[in-house]
Image (tube, rainbow, N blue to C red):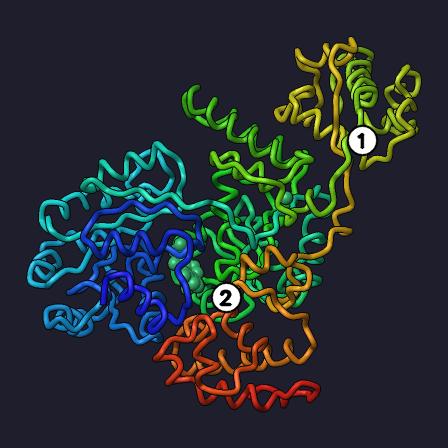
Amino acid sequence: MDEEDEAARILREVFGYPQFRGEQRQIVAHLIAGGDALVLMPTGGGKSLCYQIPALARDGMGVVVSPLIALMQDQVAALREAGVRAAALNSAMSWPQVQETERRARAGELDLLYVAPERLLTERCLSLLDRCRLALVAIDEAHCVSQWGHDFRPEYLQLAVLADRYQSVPRIALTATADIATRKEMIERLRLRDPRVFVASFDRPNIRYRIAEKDTPRRQLLRFIREEHPGESGIVYCLSRASVEDTAAQLAREGIDALPYHAGLDSGTREDNQRRFIRDDGIVMVATIAFGMGIDKPDVRFVAHLDLPKSIEGYYQETGRAGRDGLPADAWMVYGLQDVVQQRRMIDQSEASAEYKRVATAKLDALLGLCETTQCRRVRLLDYFGEDSAPCGNCDNCLERPQEWDGTVAAQKLLSCIARCRSATGFGFGAQHVIDILRGNRTAKVEQFGHEGLSTFGIGADLEVAQWRSVLRQLVMLRLVEVDTERYSVLRLTAASREVLRGERAIWLRRAVDRDAVRPASRRPVDRTRVTAAQAARVLSDGSVPAADDGTHLALFETLRAWRLQVAREHGVPAYTVFHDATLEEIARRRPGSTAELRAVSGVGAVKLERYGPAVLDLVQGAQPGVTPAPAP
Ligand code: ADP
Ligand code: ZN
């Protein structure tokens, strides 16, 4: 049997998948043949199989360097569910457990060993590995070698010792970070030998990107979760610890299973919350960006941003945590004027060098451009990573094209109103007051300053308050208005404003859209009726176009999910390690009537078939079409 057949056999037999995804086949073949590789794939792209399969196909044990101890155990549990002989060595283990694992490694009883970098570099561990036959070394999250990135880990630099110590052992470095500078750093610092570099498409077709204007953020979020993702797992990102706490508490009061996560919580609470998020179904994690690296929970159905991230890289990394299983998922964000002002202020007030500030500002502006664009969000995102694409049909702008309007006159009105009230009074005013003047509202403050006498009083009655706010936000983004955060957020013109006032520059604005009108992406994982056939075909592992939902399908899916949760609790493992949502979904859709039919479902490997086949077939049989299934155990 040649190597490629062996790889395909392992994919099918052990992992239960009918075919490789993207370049997995080539990567696996290259490693089996003994070559080094650098693999860049988006989150959820399927990096793990790239080293797990060669580790099984080659003689000896695969060593996986992974930075997050807390998550190692789950990776090992998932492999064991599939019948792979996997173990971890880390500081969370007891001494007898460590000794037993070392014994198994020496005895050649392990296919895969997961180790944290600091542990790997100890003499004890290296001398253990000296005595083992090694199939390969995989270095996960390899961008941690980059001193410029925010995930830098000094231990990663020392991993270069593996190049000399295990010269004949192929090494593979993996990351979801795309940029070219980091790519070079990884190759050099890890001293990969003549590596083949595999760069996957960074597109995540099952993620629906949606960016709306911030109005009442917590209420918007609550409605989004209630109406579109009830009972499902999701992550909500907030900028500050305080807003993490408040948001989590509020969601919890509203009956949503929400937990907080930020660096200010003690490590016990953090770990508990993370564990619950991974293990249970349907937890919403409200977090700062401290949360997320290495979380490979496949069934996160949404990632919501209540505050603006700092860059498109950040946004893409965070949203990438949704929908790793390939089923429809939402990346949902609300943003407003305050976000722009706050992020700019953070850059201005930081102690960093002028060069750093320039880069940070450019990155923020690229993200703001994404927020305000009327074009396909995905095209814009992929373009940022150097990839060409066509409008996707699965983002808010594609689904409902926002209109652009000639905002030149509105911009002139707003700018001159800002100028007039400043020159009439000798100091500036904030957004609310300026909009009151434009709309002709005789508020106490307007009368106090005699602003009803300004020539701009009432010239903007044609636009609603919300529309004026939208105009203002876009002018701030375009740097035609400045918000002075030092002094009561008063508005000020900029050098560029004059061009607009003189009529030398036309201003096209994005019309505020009622995003509630955009239909949700993914009420339930099984509800594919809202995904276009083309996307579904890309999403479904067998390439088939899904049948329409007949109701029993959904009920059976829920029954299977409840059964899965019970099994997972009994085994003390995360629910997804038993079967993924995608697998349960396919079972519910196909209703296999025999072991052979069940075996054909993607994600059902030999060991799982033996372990769970009878129970699953019973549940399927108990749920005949047209018959309401018995409630789950
Ligand atoms: P990454 O580490 O790149 O973020 P993972 O390795 O965790 O991604 O894979 C993401 C998900 O895709 C996992 O649930 C995995 O089981 C699934 N997957 C990977 N490769 C395949 C494949 N060839 N066919 C079907 N599912 C796959
Ligand atoms: Zn699109």
| Left or right: residue 363 compared with residue 133 | right
Residue 38: % across, % down: 29, 45
Identity, as a three-letter code, of the amino acid under mark 1: Trp
Q: Which circle's residue, 1 or 2, is located before the other in the chain?
A: 1
- Asked if one can make out residue 90 in the rendered structure from this viewpoint, the answer is no
Residue 253: % across, % down: 65, 64
Residue 410: % across, % down: 82, 23
| Left or right: residue 592 compared with residue 457 | left
Identity, as a three-letter code, of the amino acid under mark 2: Asp
Q: 40 and 264: which one is in front? A: 40
Mark 2: is the Cβ under 8 angstroms from ligand 1? no
Disc assigned to residue 613: none
Give above or below for 33 relative to 148.
Answer: below
Query: What quarter of the picture does the C terminus occupy?
Result: bottom right
Q: Quadrant of residue 457?
A: top right
Disc assigned to residue 542: 2
Q: Quadrant of ligand 2?
A: top right
Q: Residue at x 70, y 18 (%)?
A: 492
Direction front: furthest residue? 1
Numbered-mark total = 2
Residue 546: % across, % down: 61, 67
| Left or right: residue 31 compared with residue 280 | left
How would you rate the neighbour count of disc 2 (Cα within 10 Å): few for under 14, some for 14-19, many for 20 or more? some
Query: Disc 1 on helix, strand or loop?
Result: helix
Q: Which residue is drawn at 59% across and 55% down?
A: 535
Give above or below for 488 relative to 19.
Answer: above
Instruction: Give the number of the mark in front: 1 or 2.
Output: 2
Separation (CA) of disc 1 from disc 2: 50 Å
Q: Residue at x 37, y 45 (%)?
A: 40
Residue corresponding to mark 1: 468
| Left or right: residue 571 compared with residue 306 | left
